[in-house]
Amino acid sequence: MEQSEPTNTKAGFVALIGAPNAGKSTLLNALVGSKVSIVSRKVQTTRALVRGIAMEGDTQIIFVDTPGIFKPKRRLDRAMVTSAWGGAGDADVIALLLDVRKGVDEEAEAILDKLPELKQPKVLILNKIDLIERSKLLELASKLNEKVSFAYTFMVSALKGDGTKTMLSQLAAMMPASPWLYPEDQVSDAPLRMLAAEITREKIYERLHEELPYQSTVETDQWQQRPDGSVRIEQTVFVERDSQRKIVLGKGGQTIKAIGQAARKEISEIAEAPVHLFIFVKVRENWSDDPERYREMGLEFPKG
């Protein structure tokens, strides 16, 4: 689709940063009105920077959902945190999302300490406001604004969509004049192959979040358009030990079959075509120390 450049258009990037499980992916999906980021009860599900695109009047707002910022322990953690701060540094506006029930915990404190180093305008988004008394909410907002100079404070419930319309129009006003950077009807620049892998990973978490550590990754090996309009997709789930492989497969392959059915349904919606999904589970010891896997996820491999 050819992109004409309407006059007086604006476009810019908003980096969503916050601690793990603050609700960034849920908020991104609500703002864009489509599933572009996976949502899971497991912390740290967003590994690469996923971009979601929202249209607000003549303005295109590209949201960058950064990995949650936390104290990195392992190499994969370090890569994700570096990626998050890198994503924030490149944006026009930085939006700090905070889960109001947690308030200012150690992770939020670390982010607040580092925010003044970034020059861009910053906004504060207080999420899950329906779960806290109003007086506590106002107290928290005032405390945070004393610590960092936020241009605006938004109070939202990402899950219910409350407060997101006001926030979108205000963010649109903060975007620079620019031609649109993506076609008007596009909601994400994450390639479909990557999005399909993310959806399968989400389904694995939903089903096995207690039993499986989050060092599992999914790669889409093949995406083949067939003459009848359907898509044949082959994916591999990589785990680090054979015991994890058995958990993912389940007795008689029942678990992976259920995961595959749930993933196929959602992938078929985003691909807008019938999907034939084939999932293989392989053990790759220490995959989280393999530079190639990081490149696949759009992350930089941290040395040392």
Image (cartoon, grey):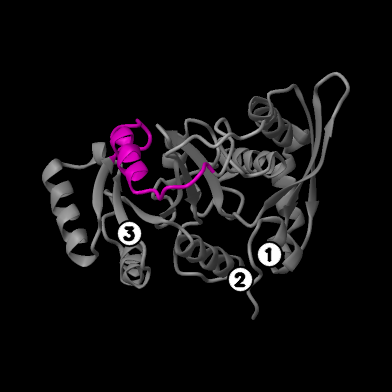
231 is higher (above) or lower (below) than 171:
above
Quarter placement of the N terminus: top right
Report helix, strand or loop for mark 1.
Answer: helix
Residue at the image position 88 percent from the left and 22 percent from the top: 227
Residue type, mark 3 in image: Pro
2 or 3: tag closer to the N-terminus: 2
Task: Point out which mark residue 132 bears.
Answer: none
Q: Is residue 132 visible?
A: yes
Residue type, mark 2 in image: Arg
Pointer 2 and pointer 3: residues touching (CB < 8 Å)?
no
Please give the residue where the numbered disc 2 appears in the rendered image.
Answer: 75
Task: Point out which mark residue 121 bears.
Answer: 3
Which-is-in-front pick, marks 2 and 3?
3
Please give the residue where the numbered disc 1 appears in the rendered image.
Answer: 288
- Residue 158 within the segment the image draws in magenta: yes
Q: Is residue 39 visible?
A: no
Residue at the image position 24 percent from the left and 51 percent from the top: 152
